[in-house]
Amino acid sequence: MVLIIGGVLVIGLVALANWVAVQNKPLLTQTFERFLLLNHVGLLLLGGGLLLLIRLGAANLLTEAEVEASDFVILGSTLLLIGVWGTAVTQPAVRRWLYPLIQVRPDSPVHTTALILAGYLIANSVAAFAQGGLDGLADSIPAASVWDVLANQALFLLLGLFGVGWLIRRRGAALYDRLGLAWPTGRQWLIGTGLIALMIALQTAAGAIWLRFDPEQAELFNEMNNILLQDFDTVGKWLLLALAAGIGEEILFRGAIQPAFGVGFTALLFAFAHVQYGLTPIFLLVFVMGIILGIARQRYNTSVVIYIHCGYNFFLGLVSLFPV
């Protein structure tokens, strides 16, 4: 229920930003930016207030509710970080400064909203990992059901579609072209298959290196991954997961975000979106894979990248079901 409510609010905000962009009225755009600014100033005050309460010892009042003071600090710090980032990127001068780095359009309410949501994604991921590192994640991570995966990927898909203005700024061929969707050629299928093999080789090498230098954490990660994906115990479920993740994540990251923010920043967001891996060597691996997928999107199209992502995930699923 929380995911659904949060998803509806985020998609609604993205749709509103696209509507404001279509109106192309400076006063309306300025009003929208002030609305975003006020919200993030509110987060700054709330986050600062939470930390102040901690400093004054008010967190002791929470013990009856079994809330740890450290959790209170993490929540306050997260709200402060989101507030600072959101307040900054609502300023046109900051977006003009960012333009050479990630090609964000300073005058676009859609790009402003995307930058704010990127801050939420990164702050949420860092806050989750701050609660005890990989050990903390392993203790708290729940098993993901097929429906959990479908719901998350449906949110990614809708964010990607509404992010590029589906039903508001773009429809039909214009929508497919903006997202980079086109049927791959025979050569592109072959190249995509080769890139699947490359990513599998990188995964194998990274896992072996991690196991060699930090076996305890590597084993903990494997155990955590097994818990997370324990519901995926058939070929059909893994195929569904591979298709859902490949389509949902690539429509959002490579289809919608990358043309605006570039390969590197998109790959970083892609890595942070996989918070279940924590800030581990696997996080770096996911970032590198994001770069590979981003380059494939640049040279070919998003459809090829969807095929690569689906094929990679499905292969890993088969290995987990039928270990050598």
Image (cartoon, grey):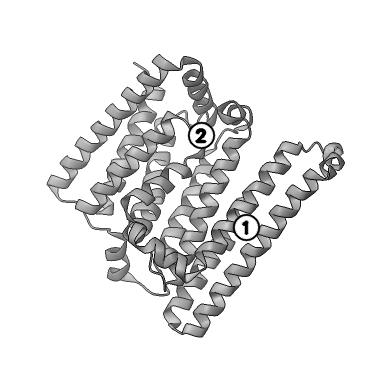
Amino acid type assigned to the residue bearing label 2 in the image: Gly
Q: Where 164 sits versus 50, above or below?
A: below
Look at mark 2 in the image and give the residue it sits on. Answer: 278
Quadrant assignment, res 36: bottom right
Give the percent coordinates (x, y) of residue 63: 84, 37
Q: Residue at horizontal 39%, vertical 74%?
A: 169
In the drawing, does residue 49 fall left or right of residue 294? Answer: right
Tag 2, which secondary structure?
A: loop
Q: Considering depth in this image, is 90 or 300 the residue closer to the camera?
A: 90
Q: Where 170 sits versus 123, above or below?
A: below
Q: Residue at horizontal 71%, vertical 53%?
A: 48
Q: Considering depth in this image, is 43 or 149 the residue closer to the camera?
A: 43
Give residue 212's mark.
none
Tag 1, which secondary structure?
A: helix
Q: Considering depth in this image, is 30 or 217 the residue closer to the camera?
A: 30
Mark 2 surroundings: few (<14), some (14-19) or many (≥20) residues within 10 A: many
Give residue 5's mark.
1
| Mark before the other along the chain sequence, 1 or 2 | 1
